[in-house]
Image: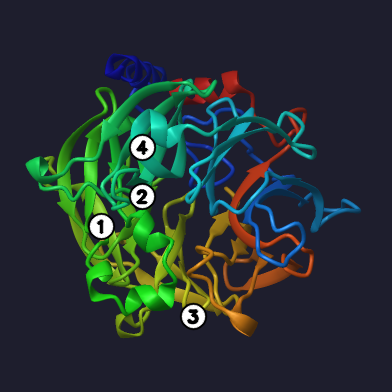
Amino acid sequence: MKSVIASAGLAALLLAGGTWDARADETCNSPFTAALIKGQEEFLHVWTLGMKGVGDESDKFVTIDVIPGSPNYGKVINSISVGGRGEAHHSGFTDDRRYLWAGRLDDNKIFIFDIQDPANPKLHKTISDLPERTGYVGPHTFYAMPGRMIVQALSNAKDHSGVTGIIVYSNQGEIVSVHPMPTDKMGGDGYAYDVGINPGQNVMLTSSFTGWTNYMMDLGTLVKDAEAMKKFGNTMVVWDVKSMEPKKVLSVPGAPLEIRWSLKPGDDWALTSTALTSKIWLIRKDANGEWQSKAVADVGDASKIPLPVDISITADAKHLWVNTFMDGTTRLFDISNVEAPKEVYSKKIGNQVNMVSQSWDGKRVYFTTSLLANWDKKGDENDQFLKAYDWDGKDLKLRFEIDFIKEKLGRAHHMKFSARPNSKAIGSTLEVYRSLLN
């Protein structure tokens, strides 16, 4: 099955002509995502964890109107309950942007939503046989390739440790190939978390987290368990995209999470942050053309374990937003010298903050709060909201806030932007591919 995905990867590289003109709405999207939002996003989709005692208690796909001037601006206009609480987590568009895939880390279900009409999404298909078909559990990252969806799992069905792999599906939801994460043979730990591809370099990076046993444990219990705390990933892997083969394992201690490539055409570097050691790491080639990892900045006071979580790079690759969960703070780093990032701004968003999504023009930044159901804070500190801000280059100014508990929705987690197909905000697939060829 590997030859199928290799052909897809090669076709993508040929289409891109060896360059990477990644014009998109969110700066964390796959570079293969077509029909890209070039202007104002119109809808915000939030993959939401159900909460016991809140509403129908089910995980939900929530849609919010963010069209300026709309009578429904800043309001929930659609909510799809998918049944049960399975630890809803991340989501990702198919390359044609017609479907949004979303996964649950506990019961391993994958939900495919049709967003042809983004104001009124529909549940299109549910995949329920991931463990039986692959031996892996915890579908986390959903990353588009041409005609394919890469699904990065966090754990395995045998012992629920962090040793896991990658599953490649067709856009129709059929398994194309399975790729185990490298272990001892290459010096890897077998762990995984996020995926990031730079087509121009023919490189895919993967990061690492922990297995089901840890991420489903109460956070207070986990941090007191010395053995459990040893079971976090400390590596990143460099893959050849065309062959989908691991080529090198990099040492990045402390659970490296989200991966963000520089979006400037021709750049060859990416950044990540480590949850347990509170550092920003740079991944780039050395003078000999070898991929290397290097810690380049601290995030807050590591002794206080601020727990860096989501990060978002600006389209011009000059700044990086970094959220720290434990103190509910977002920080902006100047990365114009990527070898020495400097914190230039910070703002407390709430008691806790996890995900950050920014518009391509950098003028709008959105935040949500939930990390994992058993890791979120408790009692009065358990903020569950979406906050939308304008960024004027100096300060974040609140536009609107939705309290997900008050609205009986649950725990707000992963966000994705969309717009109506006939909107001027959307660029055609042909237009985008032509820009890649140029």
Looking at the rendered structure, the kind of residue marked 3 is Asp
Q: Are marks 3 and 4 in contact (CB under 8 Å)?
A: no
Name the foreground residue: 354 vs 421. Answer: 354
Residue 430 percent location from the top left of the image: 58, 18
Question: Residue 348 sits in which quadrant?
Answer: bottom right
Task: Name the mark on residue 327.
Answer: 3
Mark 4 secondary-structure assignment:
strand
Choose the circle earlier in sequence order: 2 or 1: 2
Mark 2 secondary-structure assignment:
loop
Say which residue label 2 marks.
193
Question: Residue 252 sits in which quadrant?
Answer: bottom left
The image shows residue 49, relative to residue 341, as above or below, that is above
Task: Name the mark on residue 233.
Answer: 1
Foreground tag (2 vs 4):
2
Looking at the rendered structure, the kind of residue marked 2 is Tyr
Task: Name the mark on residue 219.
Answer: none
Residue 321 percent location from the top left of the image: 47, 63
Q: Label 3: few (<14), some or many (≥20) within 10 Å?
A: some
Choose the circle earlier in sequence order: 3 or 1: 1
Looking at the rendered structure, the kind of residue marked 4 is Ile
Say which residue label 4 marks.
197
Q: Label 4: few (<14), some or many (≥20) within 10 Å?
A: many
Residue 333 percent location from the top left of the image: 41, 68
